[in-house]
Amino acid sequence: EDAEEAIRAGDKTAKVDWMMRFHRRISRSPQQVLRYCWGGEPLWLQAPPGAPPGCCCGAARCFEMQLLPTLPSRLAHTVPSEKASALTMEWGTLVVFTCSKDCPCEDPREEFLVIQPAE
């Protein structure tokens, strides 16, 4: 409980076992492969990095979605076994941040991705 309070309070220097918190939360729904909550908070495997750089329109970026390490194993159940070996991924979680103003544009915009390793 103290660790989660420190996280909510924004204390990124607290000695928190991020991996255990991640696994405890994921165990609630082990079949999930994607977490989506535009403007919400990602679930970190390690201490979170600093704030992502702002969007080209000048607005801050916010959390939009996260791919979880359960994705490869869930995909493996849907593809033929001879192709399953191609599904290995060398990451723990992928976190996508997008423009908080959802700026309109004609051309596709580059978003910001944080990759945390599985280690």
Image: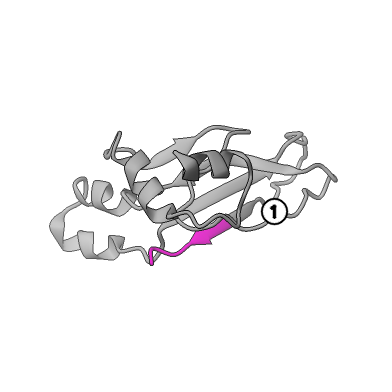
Q: Residue at x 53, y 50 (%)?
A: 95
Residue 105: x %, y % from top left: 77, 39
Residue 11: x %, y % from top left: 62, 49
Of the residues shown, which amino acid type is indicated by label 1? Pro
Q: In the displayed structure, does residue 95 sit left or right of residue 26?
A: right
Is 112 or 21 nearer to us in this picture?
21
Residue 85: x %, y % from top left: 22, 65
User: What sort of colour scheme is used for the picture?
Assistant: one colour
Is 19 or 83 nearer to us in this picture?
19
Q: Residue at x 31, y 49 (%)?
A: 70
User: Where is the N terminus found, in terms of image quarters?
Assistant: top left
The residue segment tinted magenta is: 114-119
Q: In the displayed structure, does residue 93 sit left or right of residue 107?
A: left
Location of residue 37 with respect to 16 vertically, above or below: above
Kindly state the secondary structure of the residue where label 1 is placed.
loop
Location of residue 78 with respect to 91 vertically, above or below: above
Residue 42: x %, y % from top left: 53, 43
Is residue 45 in the magenta section? no
Circle 1 residue? 52
Is residue 118 in the magenta section? yes
